[in-house]
Image: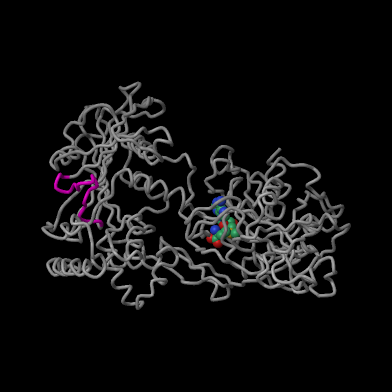
């Protein structure tokens, strides 16, 4: 173990990302030198800089064609590394630097589905040649088993009807089959460590093989090959499966919590059987890369297909018939793009942007940390409008620590909404969540007699008001108050404190926002900041720009219930399309989003204008995407602006047509106004 705890921590963090220790050490050395040992630069954003530097390093190493020089340097490095960074490394790691063959092959993972023996399989042959098989078997069907407490050597058979609707020549003869999913970690004995983990010698080139036998058996095999690269230890297969699942669940959020990698691999096997009956190479490529991406370098992953057909595809013989080879060359790794701070220094914290895919247009907008009026919106902020009841002119220091709640707690029933830790009180938060998600109750809604939203659409014959949710407000101390800026009743106005990152989502949602650290329940994350427009201005703007891919308006109707007739200039909205803050990147998630938007009164008791603040509804893990429920009714046909097909991944996703459950034909998707009418839509949906 390294003596320096910071080195040890960095190595452990990188190990979780499966970076070879040798690479981590080499890069750490360089970075420490470069940053003059300023560890905070390396550690910030959960080692984002280190991750990038390692990827760069690996790319450079790979590009070094002079293998002998490369070997010499690597050995040289590795010895130095031990001296100055890892003084007390485990002997097994030291050992791995020596006696390394230039080119070795270790099969990391092989998955088999089927019940019959493979005959004449190059895969099983190659596995045999490599020596011992270390095998772990998982139950394919249950989530518990795939996520937690996996046990090796447990084999479960799952009944599958192979015939079903697959009209597959190869499997047609088997009406019902047992389908076993077996994950095997295959390696040569000399690569095995004492603790059971496996040393692998390369990470730059991997080969994915899929093969099927005529009796319906499919083998998926992932092979990693070395090219004289630094030695490293491959993690235990349990860790690999869990890591991949966690990554999809936590970072990408494109799948539900019931996702199981093993189940996914099983589906891959079944798809392979289906496709191999009549597929062409193209159809398989299309299956892997998506119909519009054939031949494109969207992922910059080179997929070579060597179709080695030993028998005709339609053959019903029982020998192995197809071996499709996809060589995934990480040499052509996607270029990472990172902006260190999209706020241009306007926030207290830096907010980076990371494009792991390297192919998305950078967002085109101006970052503003606070709302600003576009034109007609008149936000009346004046000391005169703040009455004695709306401020605490005799407080000092921290209002939360005084024995009696001051006047500023009046709005929240004489109790402050925040705890001394700066979180929303659970009772208050839960009440807000219940109002926005719970069964709709009529007294939660206000129906205008002359609704500005409907007036904007048709001034002469406005439709009936769709209803506006009467929201609970938080009220913060402000300028007329005599407490300090550190008062616990000033949270939103102090701005963002969480470590956030804009990232390109993997699920087709465009950019998204994630947290780089765990956030507790009830924490303020950020505001929704944009241009303040009148409702009419927004309507006109949307009519002009309805083709914009992403639109970002929010109606500030949380307190319309207190007005008899709302004048057009008082019906305000926020639009973050052209000017906005990081809140504009928060994607929608149906029903079980981790953020809730709560109106916060700061500068004025006049609630035509307020701040819309996002708080966590539950504890959010580091790297989890932050989402809120826009309140969209995906069945609403009458919206002028076309909305997105929802890819939120929630098990309770409301966009049924997007999932093919409702026919799409004449149904139009509409987004922007859905945001504006979110209340009514949620209500309808809940009914
Ligand atoms: C407020 S923006 C969020 C940031 C946006 N993803 C971007 O790249 O700038 C809203 C837009 O993001 C996309 N989006 C948000 N949530 C989505 C979801 N669940 N499924 C698909 N697209 C989504 C839609 O294009 C939507 O109009």
Left or right: 25 with respect to 370? left
Q: Position of residue 75 (x, y in %)?
A: 16, 66
Is any atom of residue 527 visible in this view?
yes
Is any atom of residue 62 visible in this view?
no
Quadrant of ligand 1: it is bottom right
Q: Is 393 drawn above or below residue 434 in the view shown?
A: below
Q: Quadrant of the N terminus?
A: bottom left
Q: Is 115 drawn above or below residue 136 in the view shown?
A: above
Dividing the picture into quarters, in which one does residue 83 lie?
bottom left
Colouring mode (rainbow / by chain / secondary structure / one colour):
one colour
Q: Position of residue 22 (x, y in %)?
A: 24, 62
Q: Is residue 194 magenta?
A: yes
The residue sitting at 35% across, 56% down in the picture is 17
Q: Quadrant of the C terminus?
A: top right
Dividing the picture into quarters, in which one does residue 642 lie?
bottom right
Q: Position of residue 353 (x, y in %)?
A: 48, 66
In front of the other: 676 or 58: 58
Q: Position of residue 10 (x, y in %)?
A: 35, 63
The secondary structure making up most of the magenta span is loop
Q: Is residue 95 magenta?
A: no
Q: What range of the chain is rendered magenta?
A: 188-203
In front of the other: 595 or 29: 29
Dividing the picture into quarters, in which one does residue 656 lie?
top right
Question: Which residue extends farthest right?
Answer: 564
In front of the other: 233 or 181: 233
In front of the other: 557 or 303: 557
Q: Is 651 drawn above or below residue 155 in the view shown?
A: below
């Amino acid at each position: 173990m390294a003596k320096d705890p910071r080195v040890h921590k960095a190595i452990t963090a990188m190990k979780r990302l499966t970076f070879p220790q040798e690479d981590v050490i080499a890069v750490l050395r360089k970075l420490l030198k470069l940053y003059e040992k300023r560890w905070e630069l390396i550690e910030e954003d959960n080692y984002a800089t280190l991750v990038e530097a390692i990827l760069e390093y690996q790319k450079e190493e790979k590009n070094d064609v002079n293998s002998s020089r490369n070997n010499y340097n690597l050995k040289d490095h590795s010895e130095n590394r031990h001296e100055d960074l890892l003084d007390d490394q485990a002997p097994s790691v030291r050992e791995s630097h020596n006696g390394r063959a230039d080119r070795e092959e270790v099969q990391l993972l092989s998955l088999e589905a089927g019940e019959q023996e493979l005959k004449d399989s190059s895969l099983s042959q190659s596995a045999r040649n490599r020596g011992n098989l270390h095998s772990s078997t998982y139950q394919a069907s249950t989530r518990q088993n795939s996520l937690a407490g996996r046990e090796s050597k447990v084999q479960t058979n799952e009944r599958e009807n192979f015939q079903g609707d697959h009209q597959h020549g190869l499997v047609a003869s088997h009406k019902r089959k047992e389908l076993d999913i077996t994950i095997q970690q295959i390696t040569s004995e000399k690569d095995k460590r004492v603790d059971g983990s496996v040393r692998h010698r390369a990470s730059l080139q991997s080969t994915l093989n899929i093969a099927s036998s005529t009796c319906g058996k499919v083998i998926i095999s992932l092979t990693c090959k070395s090219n004289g690269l630094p030695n490293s230890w491959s993690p235990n297969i349990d860790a690999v499966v869990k890591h991949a699942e966690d990554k999809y669940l936590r970072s990408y959020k494109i799948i539900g919590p019931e996702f199981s990698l093993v189940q996914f691999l099983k589906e891959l096997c079944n798809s392979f059987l289906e496709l191999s009956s009549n597929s062409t190479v193209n159809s398989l490529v299309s299956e892997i890369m998506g119909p519009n991406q054939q031949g494109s370098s969207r992922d910059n992953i080179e997929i070579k297909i060597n179709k080695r057909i030993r028998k005709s595809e339609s053959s019903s013989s029982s020998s192995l018939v197809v071996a499709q080879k996809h060589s995934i060359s990480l040499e052509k790794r996607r270029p990472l793009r990172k902006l260190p701070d999209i706020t241009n220094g306007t926030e207290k914290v830096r907010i980076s942007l990371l494009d792991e895919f390297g192919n998305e247009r950078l967002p085109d907008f101006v970052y503003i940390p606070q709302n600003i009026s576009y034109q007609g919106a008149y936000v009346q902020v004046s000391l005169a409008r703040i009455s004695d009841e709306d401020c605490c002119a005799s407080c000092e220091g921290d209002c939360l620590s005084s024995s009696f709640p001051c006047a500023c707690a009046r709005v929240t029933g004489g109790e402050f909404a925040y705890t001394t830790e700066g979180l929303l009180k659970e009772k208050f938060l839960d009440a807000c969540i219940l109002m926005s998600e719970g069964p709709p109750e009529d007294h939660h809604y206000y129906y205008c007699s002359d609704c500005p939203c409907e007036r904007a659409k048709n001034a002469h014959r406005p439709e009936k008001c769709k209803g506006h949710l009467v929201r609970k407000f938080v009220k913060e101390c402000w300028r007329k108050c005599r407490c300090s800026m550190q008062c616990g009743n000033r949270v939103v106005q102090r701005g963002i404190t969480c470590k956030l990152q804009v990232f390109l989502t993997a699920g087709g949602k465009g950019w998204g926002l994630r947290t780089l650290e765990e956030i507790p329940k009830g924490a303020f994350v950020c505001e929704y900041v944009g241009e303040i427009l009148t409702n009419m201005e927004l309507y006109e703007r949307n009519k002009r720009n309805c083709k914009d891919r992403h639109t970002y308006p929010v109606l500030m109707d949380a307190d319309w219930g207190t007005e008899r007739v709302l004048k057009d200039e008082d019906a305000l909205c926020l639009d973050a399309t052209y000017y906005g803050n990081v809140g504009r990147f928060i994607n929608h998630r149906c029903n079980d989003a981790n953020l809730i938007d709560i109106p916060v009164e700061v500068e004025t008791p006049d609630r035509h204008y307020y701040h819309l603040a996002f708080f966590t509804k539950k504890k959010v893990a580091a790297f989890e995407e932050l989402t809120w429920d826009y309140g969209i009714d995906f069945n609403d046909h009458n919206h002028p602006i076309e909305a997105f097909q929802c890819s939120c991944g929630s098990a309770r996703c409301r966009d049924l047509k997007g999932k093919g459950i409702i026919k799409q034909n004449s149904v139009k998707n509409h987004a922007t106004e859905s945001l504006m009418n979110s209340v009514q839509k949620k209500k309808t949906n809940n009914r």
